[in-house]
Image (tube, grey):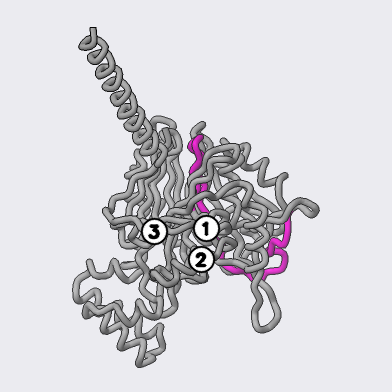
Amino acid sequence: MKKTVALILCLALFLCALSSYTDQNTDQEEKNMDKLYTLNWDCEPVEYEHFTDLGHYMIELKGISVNDIPAALAYHAKTGDSYATNACSGTAKKNDRNQVLMSHSMEVESSQHPGFITRISDGKYDTLMITYTGSAGPYRYTPEDLAKMDQDPDYLRSVPIKATDVMNETGLYMSVDMRAGDAEGGMDCPGTNPGKPRASALSAPALVGLNCATVKEAIAFLNDSYDWYTLAFGYASGASYSWNMAFLIGDATGEYGLIEFGRNGVYFTPYQNFQSNYYIHPLLAERATLNHGHGRAAELLGGLVDVQTEQDILANQKNGKYSHEMFRPSWEFYSDAEGLSDINVRRTLSAEEQARIFDEEVIHTGGIPDNVEKLAAYFAGDETGLRDDGFVWLSTIMTGVNCATKHAIIEMWENNTIIEVQWP
């Protein structure tokens, strides 16, 4: 009898232990599933109070909520624009299976600032946001600055509402680019809905992702929810111009198009399959005077016809950008000292091509000895001087997205920092 009782007790203890082990494994699987994205690098993460340093210049924010949005909008309005990019572009099309494919290339500024991944799960729709704050951001990717950033909750709260690429659980994807500054009267956008809560147009992707499931819902939301403004800048003469915003947007239902801000309004062009740094909507294009990026758009459109997958559209975005930038350049890509081109990719060129580009760089830097020496050192393999000045980019942010399958590939920096997002 005692042996039987002991055996039953042992069996009960074993079953309890097995149940506990199973629960732990289930918890771990759920935790991994909750991660949503995978990284293609292997770094030991460093935990801070408010974020995790994932390595490769990437920061994962913790505990950001929709309750933080009003304070974030107020902080952003007070501190000004931190969207520091140039020569952005993107494409969108349907493949043969009626799936919306989208790409985005954002030529970012300095290589010394982190990018951010944020997931906000308490909005109407669970949303993942990729944010690069650029050289206008206050913190560089150093242990000292990251420690300071950890103690700056106002800044951290503001990061998601400056997201460059947003995808939510429905497959809705939206990316931000900007239009050329324009002195033409009326192109500024100081507000679209007087009396509504104020929000920078830069915040549109984040707020759309949290509140909308389709392109149609997004257009209604943009027209009715906030008083959107673009940040105006001034010439020495006193004339003003604005970095107006533009957004490619697509959803899982097969809708896509281009949203542009300007002339105090939100303008939508359905089924627009590309965007560059010039206005597309006729009511904006007829007034604009300082557009550029036509050559880059032509390169992108030339390869778009063969695109069938998110991998294809990402490859086309890369090929179009590099081809135009390297072999058919225009002023907007020169010089590195002006922060307008990605010179890391030039290492794939021949010595003759490098020499030709170097000569053109010298012209655009005005032959300033210090810059010439730094450029020469770079092409000889020493990038320290240019990096210290913030002139060498870690390439760009590039994306390839399939809205129907809710899958996104995001390449950041020197194309070895890849984040792959897959919504269940």
Q: Label 3's element? A: strand
Q: Position of residue 302 (x, y in %)?
A: 37, 51
According to the image, label 3 marks what residue?
53
Check disc 2 and give the amino acid type.
His
Question: Could one spot residue 250 in this view of the protein?
Answer: no
| Magenta region, residue range | 165-192
Magenta segment: does it hold 173? Answer: yes
According to the image, label 1 marks what residue?
177
Q: Main secondary structure of the magenta part?
A: loop
The residue sitting at 57% across, 54% down in the picture is 161
Check disc 1 and give the amino acid type.
Asp
Tally of numbered tags:
3
In the picture, the quarter occupied by the C terminus is: top left
Alpha carbons under labels 1 and 2: distance apart = 13 Å
Q: Label 2's element? A: loop
Q: Position of residue 163 (x, y in %)?
A: 52, 54
Alpha carbons under labels 2 and 3: distance apart = 37 Å
According to the image, label 2 marks what residue?
292
Check disc 3 and give the amino acid type.
Asp
* Near-viewer residue (200 or 360): 200
- Mark nearer the N terminus (1 vs 3): 3
Q: Quick one: which residue is furthest to the front in this view?
A: 2
Alpha carbons under labels 1 and 3: distance apart = 26 Å
Residue 26 vertical placement versus 68 (above, below):
above
Residue 228 vertical placement versus 375 (above, below):
above
Q: Is residue 277 left or right of residue 107?
A: right
Say whether marks 2 and 3 touch (CB < 8 Å). no
The residue sitting at 52% across, 61% down in the picture is 277
Is label 1 or label 3 in front? 3
Q: Position of residue 119 (x, y in %)?
A: 49, 46
- Mark nearer the N terminus (1 vs 2): 1
